[in-house]
Image (cartoon, helix red, strand yellow):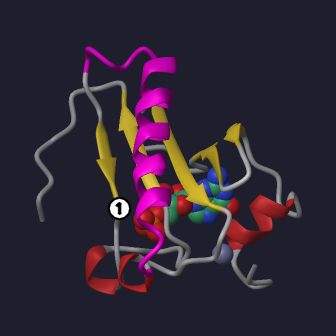
């Protein structure tokens, strides 16, 4: 928990969000500035800054975040249509919020955005 982190404050309930999933190790909520009709952020409760800050032992968590995004995509009827999972990491990766998160984006044909 980092008091000055917006996602930590969402996790504690201090800041409201449109939660779509919660368990003991992660939450998922709708992005405040969606880029498609489905734009959900899957966020570990633990304040891990970004991919380089992952430690041995986080493999299971990261795997379960991906599997949760897959389940949420099914809930959103995106399984056959397709969707994108994105992790931005660090300044040049376009990460704005320094608390690890997985974007689930879908509901329209996405452009090729490999940088
Ligand atoms: P990043 O660029 O760090 O990968 O993405 C951060 C995402 O968090 C952005 O898509 C942004 O719209 C979203 N975001 C930032 N602040 C808030 C907030 O207070 N609530 C919600 N629901 N999303 C937020
Ligand atoms: Zn945090």
* Front-most of residues 113 and 70: 70
**Residue 60 falls inside the magenta stretch:** yes
Residue at the spot 33% in from the left edge and 19% down from the top edge: 79
Please determine whether, in this image, residue 110 is positioned above or below residue 108.
below
> Residue 58: where, in percent of width, then height?
47, 69
Q: Confirm or reject: label 1 Cβ below 8 Å from ligand 1.
A: yes
Quadrant field for ligand 2: bottom right
Quadrant in the picture for residue 110: top left
Question: Does dot 1 land on a helix, a strand or a loop?
Answer: loop
**Quadrant location of the C terminus in the rendered image:** bottom left
**Quadrant location of the N terminus in the rendered image:** bottom right
> Residue 50: where, in percent of width, then height?
44, 78
**Residue 85 falls inside the magenta stretch:** no
Q: Residue furthest right?
A: 14
> Residue 17: where, in percent of width, then height?
75, 48
- Decide if residue 91 is on the left or right side of residue 62: left
Q: Callout 1: few (<14), some (14-19), or many (20+) C-alpha neighbours within 10 Å? A: some
- Decide if residue 14 is on the left or right side of residue 94: right
Residue at the spot 50% in from the left edge and 29% down from the top edge: 72
* Residue assigned mark 1: 87
Residue at the spot 45% in from the left edge and 57% down from the top edge: 60
Please determine whether, in this image, residue 45 is positioned above or below residue 68.
below
- Decide if residue 41 is on the left or right side of residue 91: right
State the extent of the magenta-drawn residues as a range.
Answer: 55-81
Quadrant in the picture for residue 3: bottom right
Q: Is residue 37 visible?
A: no
């Amino acid at each position: 928990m980092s008091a000055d982190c917006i996602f930590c404050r969402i996790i504690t309930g201090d800041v409201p969000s449109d939660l779509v999933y919660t368990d003991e190790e992660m939450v998922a909520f709708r992005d405040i500035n969606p880029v498609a009709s489905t734009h959900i952020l899957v966020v570990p409760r633990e304040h891990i800054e970004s991919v380089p800050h992952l430690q041995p032992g986080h493999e299971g968590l990261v795997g379960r975040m991906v599997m949760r995004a897959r389940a949420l995509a099914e809930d959103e009827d995106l399984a056959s249509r397709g969707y994108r999972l994105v992790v931005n990491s660090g300044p040049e990766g376009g990460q704005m919020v320094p608390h690890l998160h997985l974007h689930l984006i879908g509901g329209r044909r996405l452009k090729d955005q490999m940088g």
